[in-house]
Image (cartoon, rainbow, N blue to C red):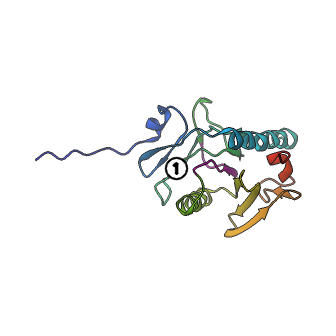
């Protein structure tokens, strides 16, 4: 009897994947491309983060598509993140074509069409726990359907602060002084 074994995927395997994917538990998890609204919202946040990086002279803002390689392996088996927008303050890779080594200090997850329902909520909570284990200080859960920004902080990971139109969200303590109005995240109501 021959037993076939499959080797777990590695970060090197992840580099060769077309499209957005993350490495979790030795498996490459592919993500469907974002639709119009989630992509537009992620860009609005990333542009504001870029402006903050320029004015503060510290850190780098990233839009959707960046890969963060996480070592050592997290408890869940996760080895990478690819948030919708993010902010990073650590050393950049010597080879600028490679993933950033380490977790972002601030990560933004913008919900896509399939990010709703009980199963999606469990997946998102697990990913937030992974972010916090990796060293991320603040995670935003951005919901284009409800037009809300829900903030989770590593100091109190199960406590959520929800912001709506007319309010201003922050990423304290990760990004001191950075603020973004929820109406700027989503634009005018139509």
Residue at horizontal 54%, vertical 34%? 19
78 or 102: nearer the eye? 78
Residue at horizontal 43%, vertical 52%? 25
Residue 13 picture quarter: top left
Residue at the disc numbered 1: 71
Q: Is residue 23 above or below residue 124?
A: above
Quadrant of the frame with the C terminus: top right
Residue 50 picture quarter: top right
The reply to whether the magenta stretch includes residue 187 is no
Residue 179 visible at all = no
Residue at horizontal 76%, vertical 54%? 147
Residue 111 is situated, as x and y percent measured from the top left of the image, at 65, 50
Segment tinted magenta in the rendering: 101-114
The reply to whether the magenta stretch includes residue 102 is yes
Residue 135 picture quarter: bottom right
**Under tag 1, what secondary structure?**
loop
């Amino acid at each position: 009897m021959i037993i076939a074994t499959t080797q777990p995927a590695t970060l090197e395997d992840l580099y060769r994947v077309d499209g957005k994917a993350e490495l979790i538990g030795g498996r490459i998890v592919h993500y469907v491309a974002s639709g119009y609204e989630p992509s537009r919202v992620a860009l609005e946040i990333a542009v504001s983060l870029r402006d903050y990086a320029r004015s503060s002279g510290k850190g780098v803002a990233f839009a959707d598509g960046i890969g963060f390689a996480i070592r050592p392996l997290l408890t869940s088996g996760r080895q990478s993140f690819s948030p919708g927008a993010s902010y990073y303050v650590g050393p950049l890779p010597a080879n600028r074509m490679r993933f950033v080594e380490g977790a972002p200090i601030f990560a933004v997850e913008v919900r896509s069409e399939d990010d709703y329902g009980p199963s999606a909520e469990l997946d998102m909570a697990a990913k937030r726990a992974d972010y916090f284990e990796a060293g991320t200080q603040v995670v935003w859960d951005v919901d284009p359907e409800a037009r809300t920004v829900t903030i989770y902080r590593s100091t109190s990971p199960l406590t959520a602060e929800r912001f709506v139109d007319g309010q201003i969200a922050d990423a304290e303590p990760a990004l001191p002084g950075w603020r973004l109005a929820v109406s700027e995240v989503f634009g005018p109501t139509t």
